[in-house]
Amino acid sequence: MGLAAALAVPSVAGAQAQAEPKFYVKPMVGAVAGSGPGATFSGAVSFRAGEKLQIAAEAGKMNNILPSSVSEDIERSAASVANAINGKHSVSSSADANYFMVTGRYALRDVSGAHTFLEIGVGAAHVETSVSAVVRGSESLQGDISSQVTTPFTTATPATKPLFSVGGRFILGVTRTTAVEVGARYQQINTDDTTIKMANIFGAFRIGF
């Protein structure tokens, strides 16, 4: 009996050592296409809600996510202002967003030692637009005309709008408590006039507790 107890102790300890962490934190960075091109920087906290389900809260920043159609509208608006006073214009524009969302991740199959997940998320994004425009060569006006360059999209921001996300990721363990994550998402912010639609490819380093 004493020998059996002695052998059982390492077995129990080994099982506990192999237990998956319940909570995770992860810094994330990604690239955006479709709008932009831009970048995302974020952090997330997640927990295991079941054998196959994880729930995560994520917050971060999206840089340079202005839709190309809005950029074209801003260019036309600046040209119209400059042409009206016989001047030449130059203009630059961008849109950034701070966001928060909650995601649910459902485990699928393992592929070559990597865990794969389907992910769906909902949240909100605070979108701000920046426009810088100048005019030159006009006798009546020189310099900054940014305040005169407007579109329906720019006049509707800053604003906080719904954010939706769907995608997938795979997780490759490094140690029992650390892993590397790589994934792709389709994300949409329902801004007025023109919806921001983008593909986000991202990576993360996960630490478990």
Image (spheres, rainbow, N blue to C red):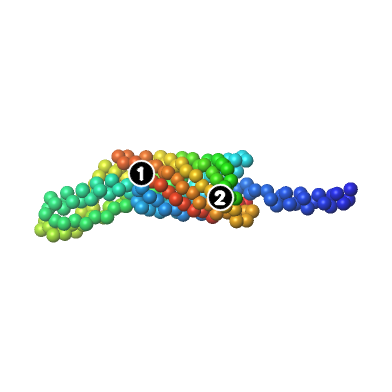
**Image point 60% across, 48% down: which residue?**
23
What is the x, y in percent for residue 159? Answer: 35, 43
Of helix, strand and loop, which one carries label 2?
A: strand
In the image: residue 194, left or right of residue 12: left
**Relative image position of residue 39 (x, y in whole percent):** 40, 54
Residue 20 shown left or right of residue 42 in the figure = right
Front-most of residues 121 and 99: 121
Local packing at callout 2 (Cα closer than 10 Å; few below 14, some 14-19, many 20+) is many
- In the depicted view, which residue is nearer to us: 106 or 83? 106
x 42%, y 53%: residue: 31
Disc number for residue 196: 1
Could you tell me residue 83's position as x and y percent? 14, 51
CA distance separating discs 1 and 2: 28 Å
**Residue with the most extreme front position:** 112
Q: Amino acid at mark 2?
A: Ile
Q: Which residue is mark 2?
A: 171
How many numbered badges does the structure rendering display?
2
Q: Can see residue 85?
A: yes
Residue at 42% in and 41% down: 163
Q: Quadrant of residue 177?
A: bottom right
Left or right, 122 with reference to 4: left
Vertical arrangement, residue 37 with respect to residue 51, above or below: below
Q: Amino acid at mark 1?
A: Ile
Visible in this render: residue 123? no
Most foreground residue, 80 or 14:
14
